[in-house]
Image (spheres, rainbow, N blue to C red):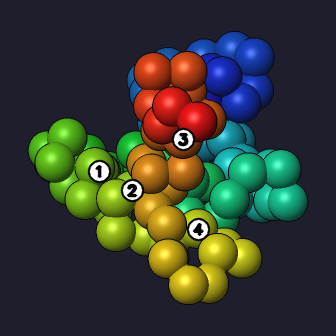
């Protein structure tokens, strides 16, 4: 996801361990993407491997259970909103 947002992969962890100049995407892309999505990307980029999601299910739970900003009644999750935008996720009209 970071590479899709930035147009390049994050620096290798070995380089970041020496001098971590990676700016959190929450600040870098605020207003461009939803805050929960940016928080998920930053979570996955934590230098401490124990601080990262330990299972894909942890990340999916976060994305499925975090409401999208500005969506009131349904409190649609990020995954739900993305699913509606994908051609195979749209319901026939």
Q: In this view, does 6 lie to the left or right of 3?
A: right
Dots 1, 3 in contact, CB < 8 A = no
Dots 2, 4 in contact, CB < 8 A = no
Q: Earlier in the sequence, mark 4 or mark 1?
A: 1
Which residue bears the numbered disc 1?
Answer: 59
Task: Pick the quarter of the image with the C terminus.
Answer: top right
**Where is residue 23 drawn, in percent x and y?**
72, 48
Residue at image location 20% in from the left, 55% down from the top: 58
Q: How crowded is mark 3: few (under 14 residues within 10 Å), some or many (20 or more)?
A: few
Task: Give 27 or 36, whichever is nearer the viewer.
Answer: 36
Q: Is residue 23 left or right of residue 58?
A: right
Q: Which of marks 3 and 2 is nearer the N terminus?
A: 2
Is residue 13 visible from the viewing direction of this image?
yes
Label 1 and label 2: CA atoms lie apart by 6 Å
Occupied quadrant, residue 31: bottom right
Which residue bears the numbered disc 4?
Answer: 68
Label 4 and label 1: CA atoms lie apart by 15 Å
Q: Which of marks 2 and 4 is nearer the N terminus?
A: 2
Label 3 and label 2: CA atoms lie apart by 15 Å
Q: Which of marks 3 and 4 is nearer the N terminus?
A: 4
Dots 1, 2 in contact, CB < 8 A = yes
Task: Give 48 or 37, whichever is nearer the viewer.
Answer: 37
Which residue bears the numbered disc 3?
Answer: 84
Residue at image location 43% in from the left, 48% down from the top: 79
């Amino acid at each position: 996801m970071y590479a899709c947002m930035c147009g390049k992969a994050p620096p290798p962890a070995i380089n970041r361990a020496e001098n971590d100049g990676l700016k959190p995407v929450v600040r870098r892309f605020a207003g461009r993407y939803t805050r929960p999505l940016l928080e998920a990307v930053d979570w996955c980029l934590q230098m401490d491997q124990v601080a990262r999601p330990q299972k894909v299910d942890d990340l999916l739970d976060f994305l499925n259970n975090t409401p999208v900003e500005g969506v009131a009644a349904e409190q649609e999750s990020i995954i739900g909103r993305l699913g509606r935008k994908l051609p195979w996720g749209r319901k026939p009209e």
